[in-house]
Image: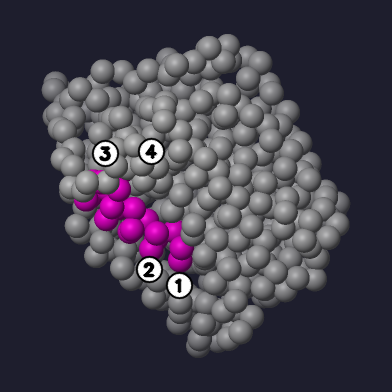
Amino acid sequence: MLQAPPSASSDREPVALDSAWPASSALRSLRYRSYRYFWLASLFTFTPWMMQFLVRGWLALQLTGSPLWVGLVAAAFQAPSLVLSFVGGVLADRFRRRNIVLTNEVVQLAGYLLLTGLFMSHSLDRWSLLLLSLASGISFALAMPARQSMVPRLVPVADTMNGIVLTNGVFSTAQIVGPALGGVLIGAWGEGAALLATAVLALPSPFLLLRVREQRTAERNGEVHSPFQEFLEGMRYVRGSAVVLALIALGAAGTMFAMPFQSFMPVFARDLQAGPQGLGILQGAVGIGSLAGVVFLSLQKSERPSTAVMVGGSLSYGLAVTLFALSPAFWSSVLIAFTVGVFGTLFLTTNFTMVQLVVPDELRGRVLSIRMVIFGMQPVGQIGGGAAAEFITTKYAVAMGGLICVALMLLVLARAPELRRS
């Protein structure tokens, strides 16, 4: 089994219980007040984020009619993670993580309001949509390492896996509610209503985050290094840990070649003649599947994730994406999208939890920033997939990405005996 080093737990203040929630409950992390506020804030973060992701893709398609532009707008959001996540990781290990996340929430809300204003005033074009997506991605990249590394400071070590799973559950719920609501609003009242609803839904998050009190670890002793030296320290740790390196490589395969399929959901909805409502149903099916995966993981009693679940989920994820791309009918696509959500959650949640539990807290922000760089590699798949879709159609481009994902995962597993023994 994977073992967390002593510094990941022994140097941390105990987290006080605030609720009589049963210790064996699948929702046991909600016993802790600060985690509950963080969990609720995440709900009001990810729901409008998923709505915005859908609406931006739909607007890109309406403005240009091009699958390549749909991929470019999505890539503009994720590309900053390729570089700026490193900066975010250093910030997360130097400053209060709650404050970094709070700043991001304010910036995202301002972006939602600006996009709504441009659309309502008929001033929105493809380039302003691209630039707003890029600005949102920059803020996201700087804050995400802090957000991802906060859970171990809000719950005790024994409940860390449960806390991470429940946080992923918020994301899965947002995948259901956000796209479904966005699709309904676009179909009933237009894109402006969906954009305005996004901004309104994002309002509670900053106020909830103000109630969060994260537990601090023991202060680091010794010389204070420059940000660049601290970044190199995180890189050396990853390079010296065969297990962490293998986990990051697996995440890269799924992120670059399988996950970008969601960026092309507007194209699939159009080709299946499903319209904006159908787009919401397809995205919602992925979210329902993700939620089912979260429920399964939250019911696990173990404090450590299962390597077998991660490996099985990773391979099944790539195969399910391939089947989704080749599905000829709308309702079969909905069913397969559900399985994509299940296997994607089993893989990504266990993969991410393993990284969290192995890495000591004083390095967690920087190591997770390297994990976030993998998220920033999505544009490679999105732009490449969009370009390929122009020549071989979207379904074959996405199917090819799913198969490449499976092949790369098999290669990593074959070359990482340390992971198989963990």
* Disc ID at residue 95: none
Front of the two marks 4 and 2: 4
Q: Position of residue 140 (x, y in %)?
A: 41, 53
Residue 225, picture quadrant: top left
- Can see residue 318? yes
Give the image location of residue 163, x and y in percent.
Answer: 36, 41
Does residue 117 appear to the left or right of 334 in the view shown? left
**Residue 220: quadrant of the picture:** top left
Residue 18 included in the magenta stretch of the image: no
Residue picked out by circle 4: 162
- Label 2 and label 1: CA atoms lie apart by 6 Å
Pointer 2: what residue?
Answer: 202
Q: Are marks 3 and 4 in contact (CB under 8 Å)?
A: yes
Residue 402 horizontal side relative to residue 346, left or right: right
Whole-angstrom CA distance, mark 3 to mark 2, is 25 Å
Residue 155, disc: 3
Q: Amino acid at mark 4?
A: Asn
Tell which of 239 and 296 is nearer to you. 296
> Are dots 3 and 2 in contact, CB under 8 Å?
no
From this view, report whether residue 68 is shown above or below residue 203: above
As helix, strand or loop, the secondary structure at mark 4 comes to helix
Q: Amino acid at mark 1?
A: Thr
Residue at (54% x, 23% y) in the render: 307
In this rendering, the label closer to the viewer, 3 or 1: 3
Question: Could you say which is closer to the camera, residue 83 or residue 252?
Answer: 252
Q: Is residue 23 above or below residue 205?
A: above
Mark 4 vs 2, N-terminal side = 4
Q: Is residue 36 magenta?
A: yes
The secondary structure type at the circle numbered 2 is helix
Distance between the alpha carbons at the discs numbered 3 and 4: 9 Å
Q: Which residue is mark 1?
A: 198
Indicate whether 260 appears above or below 223: below
